[in-house]
Image (cartoon, helix red, strand yellow):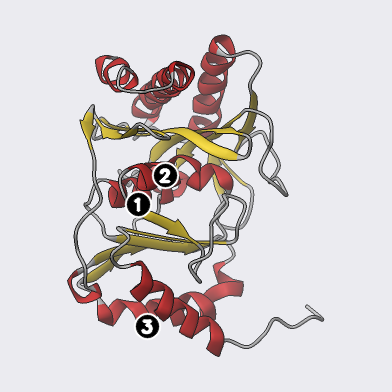
Amino acid sequence: MHRVTASAAQCADPHLAAIITAAGTAALKAGRILRQLYGQPHRITHKGAIDLVTEADVAAEQAIIAHLRAAFPQIGFLAEESSAMPTSMPSTPCWIIDPLDGTTNFAHHFPWFATSIGYSEGGEIKAGAIYQPLLDELFLAVRGSGGWLNNERIRVSDTAELQQSLLATGFPYNIKEKIGEVMDVLTSILPRTQGVRRAGAAALDMAYVACGRLDGFWEINLKPWDTAAGLLLIEEAGGRVSDFRGNAFSPIDNEILVSNTLLHEQLTSTLTDIISRQPPPNPSG
């Protein structure tokens, strides 16, 4: 708890200090549940052909909501396992929750997953917490006050050339329909870098960009609970978040590109060129 309260003490806004304290504490509680259930046999259900849900997703979400509701009963929820995909960002105060980002990894006992909690107010992300329980790494961010990893200030990398960069990406659940688009982008970007990682947890990929371990990340078809906390971490650490063309990003958008800022124009130039060469969608479906 010390790392939560110590980071909150550095916030200029007392309201957001209380918000990040609640979010960080809830993320730690969910992480304890995930650690206890990790490596155990799982009850697995499917939201889609390759989109899994385990008992850990549900238990962690319930614990998060219970804690946040007790702390701030007036704030609403947008949570992966109990909410529909919104068509716009909520205008009223709202928690945006992914109890287990990387469920497929978790179900296969692959140790790369996290809990992600964002806080939105007036349609803007104001606070975020991402917790990797197996590494015990807690990332926190508050708009206007900064970002932290276990109470240490974080900063994006200073890599200025793609050829020197390490990037990350992810594949959408509807990969069968998007395989051409996904591979066109990967084929174009991969040879221009030192490497591209695909570990399967977008929130952690974004947290790693924020703390300088990765230099950039891109993906399509993510949901608000995948990106809410991570995008604020990146912005507060000096990075940039946009769509593939470099336009302003909203968590309900279909595509996200994040970087250390220095690489952003190189990446948007590459992505825009690929997009311009792709055939338009077939209106007949």
Where, quadrant-wise, is the N terminus in this rendering?
top left
Q: Going 58% across and 14% down the picture, which residue do you hit?
A: 72
Relative horizontal placement of residue 208, taking residue 249 as reference (left or right): left
- Pointer 2 or 1: first along the chain: 1
Q: CA distance from mark 2 to mark 1?
A: 8 Å
- Kind of residue indicated by mark 2: Gly
Q: Which mark is residue 169?
A: none
Say if residue 160 shows up in the picture. Answer: yes
Determine whether the residue tagged by mark 2 lies in a helix, strand or loop: helix
- Pointer 1 or 3: first along the chain: 3
Nearer-the-camera pick, 193 or 198 = 193
Disc 2 packing (10 Å; few <14; some 14–19; many ≥20) = many
Q: Would you place residue 178 above or below residue 158 in this image?
A: below
Relative horizontal placement of residue 85, taking residue 134 as reference (left or right): right
Q: Quadrant of residue 122?
A: top right
From the top left corner, tell me how far across and down residue 242 is, in percent.
48, 60
Q: Which mark is residue 230?
A: 2
- Kind of residue indicated by mark 1: Asp
- Residue to which mark 1 is pinned: 205
Nearer-the-camera pick, 62 or 242 = 242
Relative horizontal placement of residue 83, taking residue 64 as reference (left or right): right
- Kind of residue indicated by mark 3: Ser
- Dots 2 and 1: beta carbons under 8 Å? yes
Q: CA distance from mark 1 to mark 3?
A: 20 Å
Disc 3 packing (10 Å; few <14; some 14–19; many ≥20) = some
- Residue to which mark 3 is pinned: 188
Q: Going 71% across and 42% down the picture, which residue do you hit?
A: 84
